[in-house]
Every structure is written in structure tokens, then in C-alpha cells.
């Protein structure tokens, strides 16, 4: 649960209170109805394919062996399709084409709802300012990780490995 001590609407203290059958932070003031619902943040992620390869990326400052999907936050009023293509363009410097919607996945550790797509690119990616390195793998060589976008990659691989 997110921890803060004062109401962002009126400045009164907040305490844990039961609302809709769950414990939530809520304002103690009788004149304020603020409740922190702690809804998940929507995130888009792309399983990037380029020809027969899957492209994984390592962010700046990440450990040398940690690679992941291209991902980013869904902006207000943005459609998930547009958001994932925007993230691909921002991080890899190339336009992409959505091949399929892989699915939505809950990443409870970060309180995120992931919308995962397969996105095909037609030319060599370029490292954006957020990335340190990319890796090209054949689907048979990709090993998905247990959390975050890993389960989506696992499901996609189960349908696409030769």
C-alpha cells in the first residue's frame, strides 16, 4: 500500500480505514471524502520482432545481464495501441507495426496493469537515451523471467516458437 500521512485535498491526516471491504488510506476529516484507491498504473509493453529475432533492451544503469521488453506508461487520453508505438519510436528510434495484442497482465509488485503487444520493426533499431544495449535472439533462445512482462513473453513464446 502507498504510504503518505496527509490528505492531498485538505491537508488533514489520513488513516487506514475500511472502504468497499478493503483497507485503504482515507482522510479523517468529516468534511472531506478523500480515499486513496491505489488503482494500478497502466503500462504498455512491446515484444519487438525484427525478422526472425526478438529484440530485448537493457536500460541505462541496469545490471549487464538484465534485458527486458520496451515498456512505458500510458498517457492520459492515449490509446494503448498508440502508446506502445510511441514507446518503440522513443526508445528504438524506429516505427513499428502492431502484429498482435498479446494480453493484459497484472504486475502487482509495482501496482501496474500491463498491456502487451507484439510489434514488428522493419529496420535496425537505434539506442535511445534510456537504453544502454539491445540484444537480438531467436525465439528458441529467449528465456522469459518470472514477473513483470516475463509472463506475457512466456505466453507469446508458447505460441511462436518453432
Image (spheres, rainbow, N blue to C red):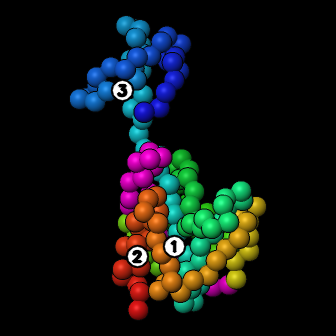
Question: Considering only vertical position in the picture, is 41 above or below 82?
Answer: above
Using the rendered view, name the quadrant where residue 54 is placed: bottom right
Q: Are marks 2 and 1 in contact (CB under 8 Å)?
A: yes
Which corner quadrant of the image does residue 24 belong to?
top left
What residue range appears in magenta? 104-123
Is residue 19 shown above or below 160?
Answer: above
Q: Which mark is residue 24?
A: 3
The secondary structure that dominates the magenta segment is: strand
Helix, strand or loop at label 3? It is: strand
**Residue 66: percent from the left, percent from the top?**
60, 65
Relative horizontal placement of residue 85, taking residue 27 as reference (left or right):
right
Distance from label 2 to label 1 (Cα)? 8 Å
In the rendered image, the vertical position of residue 21 relative to residue 100, given as above or below: above
Q: Quadrant of residue 162?
A: bottom left
Spatial distance from mark 1 to mark 3, Cα to Cα? 35 Å
The foreground one among 91 and 132 is 132
Residue receiving disc 1:
47
Query: Which quarter of the figure is the N terminus placed in?
Result: top left
Amino acid at each position: 500500500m502507498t504510504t503518505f500521512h496527509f490528505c492531498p485535498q485538505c491537508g488533514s491526516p489520513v488513516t487506514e480505514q475500511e472502504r468497499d471491504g478493503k483497507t485503504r488510506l482515507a482522510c479523517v476529516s468529516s468534511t472531506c471524502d478523500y480515499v486513496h484507491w491505489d488503482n494500478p498504473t497502466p503500462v504498455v509493453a512491446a515484444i519487438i520482432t525484427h525478422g526472425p529475432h526478438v529484440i530485448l533492451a537493457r536500460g541505462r544503469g541496469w545490471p549487464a545481464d538484465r534485458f527486458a521488453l520496451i515498456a512505458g506508461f500510458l498517457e492520459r487520453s492515449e490509446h494503448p495501441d498508440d502508446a506502445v508505438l510511441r514507446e518503440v519510436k522513443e526508445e528504438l528510434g524506429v516505427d513499428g507495426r502492431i502484429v498482435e495484442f498479446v494480453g493484459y497482465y497484472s504486475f502487482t509488485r509495482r501496482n501496474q496493469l500491463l498491456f502487451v503487444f507484439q510489434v514488428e520493426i522493419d529496420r535496425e533499431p537505434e539506442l535511445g537515451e534510456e537504453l544502454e544495449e539491445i540484444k537480438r535472439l531467436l525465439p528458441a533462445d529467449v528465456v522469459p523471467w518470472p514477473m513483470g512482462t516475463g509472463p506475457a513473453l512466456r505466453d507469446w513464446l508458447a505460441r511462436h516458437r518453432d
